[in-house]
Image (cartoon, rainbow, N blue to C red):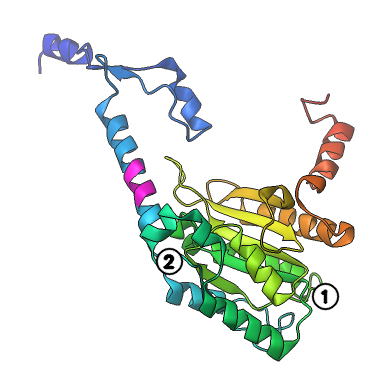
Amino acid sequence: MSEKKKSLQQHQVTPVTENPWHKLNDFTDARIGLGRAGVSVPTKHLLAFQLAHAQAIDAVHSTLNIEKLTTDLNKLDWAQACAPDCAPLILHSRAKDRATYLQRPDYGRLLNPESAKKLDEHRVQNTPQYDLAIVVVDGLSSLAVEQNTLPFLQALQTYLVPNSVHPDNTWKLAPLCILEQGRVAIGDDVCERLHASCVLVLVGERPGLSSPDSLGLYLTWGGKVGLTDAYRNCISNIRPAGLSYQEAARKAFYLLNEAHQLKLSGVNLKDRSDDDLINQDRTTKNNFLIA
C-alpha cells in the first residue's frame, strides 16, 4: 500500500462527531456524551436505546416463574426460625391477570379471596406470633425478583437465622410468601392476616432504561390495610449493578432492629446505618465532604 493511500485512510473523516463528555460513561449508566451523526444520535447509541426499551417492556409483561423461584427459596435455611410449616405460601392479588394488574393498581394491593382464606387458615392452625413476614412480589419486573431475591435473602438470613456468626439470632419468621400480580401495599394485607409485627416486601421495581432488573424493599411496622407510603421505609436498586446484596441486607437489618425497638416505621424512622462510617471518615479525615 502506498504512503499516500495510508495517509488518506488515517485522515478519513467519520460521520460521527464524538462528545468530550463521553468519558463520564465510565462512572454512570446514564446516557451522557453520546455524540452525533449529522443532526441525529449515532446508530450504535440508538440501537442500544431501543434494546433497553425492549428489555424494560419485557420486564413489565413477563410472568414470574413461580416453580423456579419456589425451588430457589427452598434452598434457604429458614427452618430454625420459621413456623413448623416453612414451605413458601403461594398467593395472588385480586388482579386476575397482567392486563388487569396494569390497569387496576387497586386490585394489586389486596389479596384475592382464596389467598386471604389460606392465610387466615394458617393463622388459626399455627396461632403464630411472628416478628417478621417476608413477602416476595412480582411487581413491575419479574426479572428483578427472579434474579435478585435469592442472593439478597441469603445475605439477610445471616442476620435473622441463628448461625455460627450470629448464634443469638431470635427472630421468629413467618413462612415466606410469594405473591403474583401484587403491589407494595399488598404486604400490609399479608402482615395483618398473619398477625406479624412487621412486613418486608421485596418487589420488582418499575424498569428504567438501564435497570430492568432492579429490586425494591419496603419495610412496614404493624402493616394493615389502608396504610400509605408514609408508613414505609424503602431500600431501592438492589442488583449487581446497583446496591449490593450485602449492603442492602445490612441496611434492612438496621431498619428492622430500629422498627422493633421504636415500634414504628416510615417518615418517623430514619436510616442512620451509615452514621458510623461517616464518623469514622471524619476521624480519619478521609471524607472530603466533611474535612
Whole-percent x and y of residue 45?
32, 31
Image side of residue 165 versus residue 226, left or right: right
Badge 2 vs badge 1, beta-carbon distance below 8 Å:
no
Whole-percent x and y of residue 192?
70, 70
Q: Which residue is mark 1?
A: 170
x 34%, y 36%: residue? 49
Element at label 1:
loop
Quarter occupied by residue 290: top right
* Prevailing secondary structure class for the magenta stretch in the rendered image: helix
Start and end of the magenta stretch? Answer: 53-57
Element at label 2:
loop
x 53%, y 76%: residue? 113
Image: 211 above or below 185: above
Q: Which residue is mark 2?
A: 64
Q: Amino acid at mark 2?
A: Leu
Whole-percent x and y of residue 198?
75, 65
Image side of residue 253 versus residue 155, left or right: right
Decide which of 206, 153 is in the foreground and name it: 206
